[in-house]
Amino acid sequence: MKSSILHSNNGYFGKYGGMFLPELLIAPMTELAKSLKIAESKSFQKIFRNLLKEYAGRPTPLTEVKRFAQAANAPRVFLKREDLLHTGSHKINNALGQCLLAKELGKKRIIAETGAGQHGVATATICAYLGLDCVVYMGACDIKRQEPNVRKMKMLGAEVRSVNAGSMTLKEAVNEALRDYAESYENTHYCLGSALGPHPYPQMVALFQKVIGEETRKQSIKYLGRLPDKVVACVGGGSNAIGIFSGFLEDDVNLIGVEAGGRGAMLGDHAARFSGGSPGVLHGTYSYILQDDSGQIADTHSISAGMDYPSVSPIHALLHDTKKATYTSVNDQEALAAFKLLSKTEGIIPALESSHALAWVMREGKHFQKNEIIIICLSGRGEKDLNRDDL
Ligand SMILES: *Cc1c(COP(=O)(O)O)cnc(C)c1O
């Protein structure tokens, strides 16, 4: 079966994944895992795929960026345009899938965590569309950094709850959402934003994002007459990357995941879990995490809020160990340069997250063969990132 690696073995991808949770959460999470069957069913997929088309704007195009490629000294470069989706990123694929599933399960209330606000906005959007109550947990620090997205969520009818613990960012927002869920799961679904967290989330989110890879593979064959040589994606939690990679897991295609190298290689200065981390548990899943010598979760830094998280999808952990994909990182400055270059050469303002994938091609493109085809997942648009002094 194609992309069977996306199917966990009882919640495990190799030795990664699992459901490391307080007793209280095991029963509701086990219940949710059973709903994977519904999510995978033909009838559910038909409704889901139809709304991806009619509401979210799929399929997204594959765009060749010749002027960018020339400036980067790279061969042929194409972008998978997730930035053109409703609400501006691939997050809407997952939010739509999970909220539809929640409705099917009879849940009337949705909670979500958000960092930059993209997942919060996508979830608030779908809740408005489906008539569900929506509460979004967001770190107080991120609320300040991402003010326009907070306004959007409120306009869409969601309640945004400020989280004041710890570093007041994404990690604490996840804690708070899990706490809420432990008390509310009978009428509430926790819509988690990436291929992370306890089983069944990694498998579920990958299921809802794999449409990116399916489309990309078809488009590549139809318009270019062959598969690409390389597929590149940024890796925050890992959902856009697993989405596009999943189309090519059985092929001889180089899959490259780009993490946030931040401002340096010291612990605390980046979010490069594969080069700077080691296996451990955070938020219910066993994967590569950034931790200090005593196993304390380390602080992270990235120029882009969507990449700024100390753990990574257990699916990527397996792809990393089996060498099915390779993982690398670019730093803040490289990402910023890519952000500017794509804007000026192509008229496309990329999200700072996606700019990490672009930056890797700018750095490495000169080493590629002349006739190579590179596809980059442009996970989102960059309007949200324009409010910076260094642009
Ligand atoms: C959230 C976000 C990311 C990072 O999340 P993944 O789960 O790694 O995809 C990347 N790009 C954009 C535009 C995002 O909003």
Image (spheres, rainbow, N blue to C red):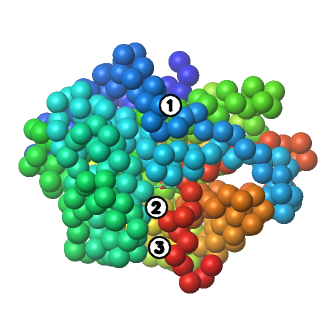
Which secondary structure, mark 3? loop
Which secondary structure, mark 2? helix
Task: Count neighbours of disc 1 (C-alpha within 10 A) and say few if under 14, some if 14 to 19, many if 20 or more.
Answer: few
Disc on the earlier residue, 3 or 1:
1
Cβ(mark 3) to ligand 1 < 8 Å? no
Q: Find the distance from the CA under tag 3 to the CA under tag 1.
A: 36 Å
1 and 2 marks in contact (CB < 8 Å):
no
Q: Nearer the viewer, mark 3 or mark 1?
A: 1
Residue that lies at the very extreme toward the top in this rendered image: 42
3 and 1 marks in contact (CB < 8 Å):
no
Instruction: Give the quadrant of residue 130.
Output: top left
Above/below status of 50 relative to 196: above
Instruction: Give the quadrant of residue 328.
Output: bottom right
- Going by the numbered disc 2, the residue's amino acid type is Gly
Q: Residue at x 46, y 26 (%)?
A: 49
Cβ(mark 2) to ligand 1 < 8 Å? yes
- Residue under circle 2? 306
- Viewer-nearest residue: 263 or 276: 263
Q: Residue at x 39, y 49 (%)?
A: 122
- Going by the numbered disc 1, the residue's amino acid type is Lys
If the image is split into quadrants, where does the C terminus sit? bottom right
Residue 160, x across and y down, in percent: 24, 62
